[in-house]
Amino acid sequence: MKLVIIESPFFNKNVKQQEYNVLYARECMKECLYNGEAPYLSHLLYTQILDDNILEERNFGIEAGFEFRKIIHQTIVYTDLGISSGMACGIENAIKMGNTVEYRKLKNFEEFKEKNKELLIINKNNETVNFVSEILNPKSYKG
């Protein structure tokens, strides 16, 4: 298996949207496993003990995740939900470290979206709200 780092949206002020992001990240992880890759997702690991709402803890988790790029040289960016500020920081770090960055879409995204539609926020025009629109500004990361 090839070691890879996954970038996908995580933080969101809306609890339902953040839950959707977590489910999406898990689905991305599963897809990587079925592709013969061993994925690492720091945003699913460190947020279990660090509070992403506290900037110092968020930055601490981001920095710890970046350390893995010293041994994992490929980053997979899942783009179905857009690119969040945290993802942008990860992409920037991967490029800075000379790592390969590959952009992907989840193969079963439509099925995933249907399965988790109760978490989707619909606006008055019957459109899905953009899940990364509430993400912290990329400049909030102080790395």
Image: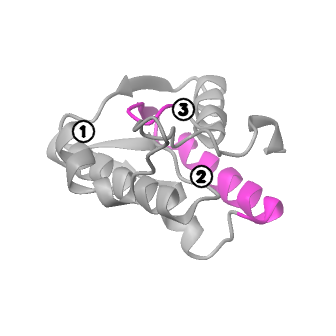
Q: Secondary structure at mark 2?
A: helix
71 and 130: which is toward the camera:
130
Mark positioned earlier in the residue sequence (1 or 3) = 3
Q: Is residue 11 left or right of residue 38?
A: right
Please state which of residues 113 and 57 is positioned toward the viewer in this rendering.
Answer: 113
Q: Which residue is mark 1?
A: 109
Graded by Cα atoms within 10 Å as few (under 14), some (14 to 19) or many (20 or more), the crowding at tag 1 reads some
Q: Which residues are magenta?
A: 53-82
Kindly identify the residue that appears in the image at 66 percent across and 25 percent down: 96
**Is 76 part of what is drawn in magenta?**
yes
Disc 2 versus disc 1: nearer the observer: 1
Q: Which mark is residue 37?
A: none
> Do the residues under discs 2 and 3 have CB atoms within 8 angstroms?
no
Which class describes the residues within 10 Å of circle 2: few (<14), some (14-19), or many (20+)?
Answer: some
- How far apart are the alpha carbons under marks 2 and 1? 26 Å
Q: Nearer the viewer, residue 68 or 136?
A: 136
Amino acid carrying label 1: it is Phe
